[in-house]
Image (cartoon, grey):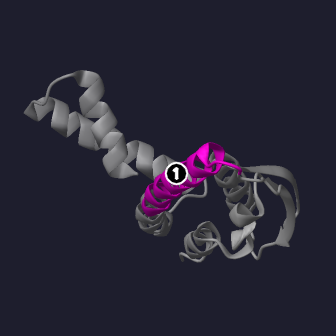
Amino acid sequence: MFVIFLLIWIIFNGQLTLEIALSGLAVSGAVYWFICRFLDYSPAKDLILCKRFFLVLHYVFVLLVEILKANGAVFKMIYAEKYCFEPAVVHFRTTLHTNFARVLLANSITLTPGTITVSLKDDEYVVHCLDKELAKGIDSSVFIHLLERIENVK
């Protein structure tokens, strides 16, 4: 967080000189001390955020890949001759602990073409799928495994 404060200081000043760098170090240090002292923050939380940052980047990359794959699958279904859609409603539970991870999973499902999260209550999901083929493996998707890894970072 200290580094972020320092970068913001330098960006807002628009240039980098010795005076700006030294005053930025002092101000960033004071703000960091303040948030550690009064806002229940610590360097240990910085380490956790850094570890989670790279996992979240990985999650976003996987989400983009899954969106592209689902686009292709839905495209094939729509343009296939005589394809008979069999919509499905899937109910499943997860072991995700935080509301953030649960909502992120629901949004990821909705962002993926062919699926819509209809309901989320506690850890129970109701998902509508355009076809039963899209419903396969939704309860043990790669999204769930990645979110569990993100939650377990200590």
- The answer to whether residue 144 is left or right of residue 23 is right
Task: Report x, y in % for residue 4.
Answer: 35, 45
Task: Report x, y in % for residue 128.
Answer: 82, 53
Query: Is 4 in front, or is 60?
Result: 60
The local crowd at label 1, few if under 14, some if 14 to 19, many if 20 or more residues have their Cα within 10 Å, is few
- The answer to whether residue 86 is left or right of residue 153 is right
Query: Would you identify the image quadrant in which residue 43 lies?
Result: bottom left
* Magenta region, residue range: 58-82
The residue drawn where x is 69% and y is 56% is 100
The residue drawn where x is 48% and y is 68% is 48
Q: Is residue 71 magenta?
A: yes
Does 55 appear above or below 69?
A: below
Q: Is residue 130 magenta?
A: no
Task: Report x, y in % for residue 42.
Answer: 50, 63
Query: Would you identify the image quadrant in which residue 20 lies?
Result: top left
Q: Quadrant of the C terminus?
A: bottom right
Q: How many marks?
A: 1
Q: Which residue is mark 1?
A: 72
Q: Secondary structure at mark 1?
A: helix
The residue drawn where x is 60% and y is 43% is 79
Task: Report x, y in % for residue 149.
Answer: 56, 75
Q: Please indicate, yes or no, whether residue 154 appears anywhere in the rendered image.
A: yes
Q: Amino acid at mark 1?
A: Gly
Query: Is 125 in front, or is 51?
Result: 125
Query: Is 104 in front, or is 31?
Result: 104
Q: Farthest left residue?
A: 18
The residue drawn where x is 60% and y is 75% is 145
Query: Would you identify the image quadrant in which residue 135 lies?
Result: bottom right
